[in-house]
Amino acid sequence: MAKYLAQIIVMGAQVVGRAFARALRQEFAASRAAADARGRAGHQSAAASNLSGLSLQEAQQILNVSKLNPEEIQKKYEHLFKVNDKSVGGSFYLQSKVTTATSIRELINLITDFHKAPTRGKPTVSTA
């Protein structure tokens, strides 16, 4: 009787161990895929996220825009800022998120302009 009980316990532990190992492998694969997807998002979004704590995708979700159209972003910003004003019962937290999301667009534009600009400080050779 004790022999059978020990066999059942060992088999059960093996089954649980295999299931745990399989779940762990799946989690590692999902984590790797998510990291790869974040890596493909581009260095501009990473730079903006490091400076503001908000990624470009999050900023687009907050402002409910799909493209970086300055007029549309400004219109959404003004509407959301007005709706979330404390004097009309809005939330200061949401209002600050809207402001941060709008500043992300401005930050992305600055980064893009910087990368497009000719290299600065390059020494020039004069033939005089």
Image (spheres, rainbow, N blue to C red):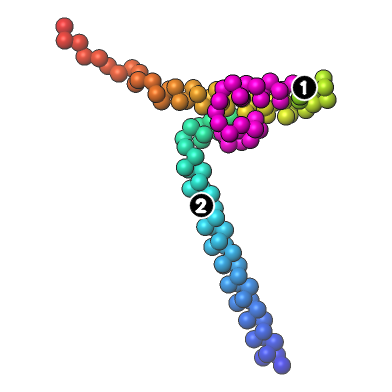
Q: Which residues fall within the magenta stretch?
A: 54-82
- Residue at image position (73%, 29%) is 93
Q: Position of residue 91 (x, y in %)?
A: 78, 28
Q: Residue at x 55, y 55 (%)?
A: 30
Question: Which mark is on residue 33?
Answer: 2
Horizontal and vertical percent position of residue 107: 53, 24
Q: Amino acid at mark 2?
A: Ala
Q: Residues within 10 Å of mark 1 (few under 14, many from 20)?
A: some
Label 2, label 1: how many angstroms apart (C-alpha)?
40 Å
Q: Amino acid at mark 1?
A: Asp
- When asked about the image quadrant of residue 59, the answer is top right
Q: Which mark is residue 85?
A: 1
The magenta stretch spans residue 38? no
Query: Up-down: is 104 above or below 2?
Result: above
Image-quadrant location for residue 68? top right
- Judge from the rendering whether residue 62 lies leftward or rightward of residue 42; answer left or right: right
Question: Residue 42: x, y in percent?
Answer: 47, 37
Asked whether the viewer can see residue 33, the reply is yes
Q: Are marks 2 and 1 in contact (CB under 8 Å)?
A: no
Dot placed on the residue nearer the N-terminal end, 2 or 1: 2
State whether residue 51 appears in this view: no
Mark 1 element type: loop
Residue shown at 60% from the left, 70% from the top = 19
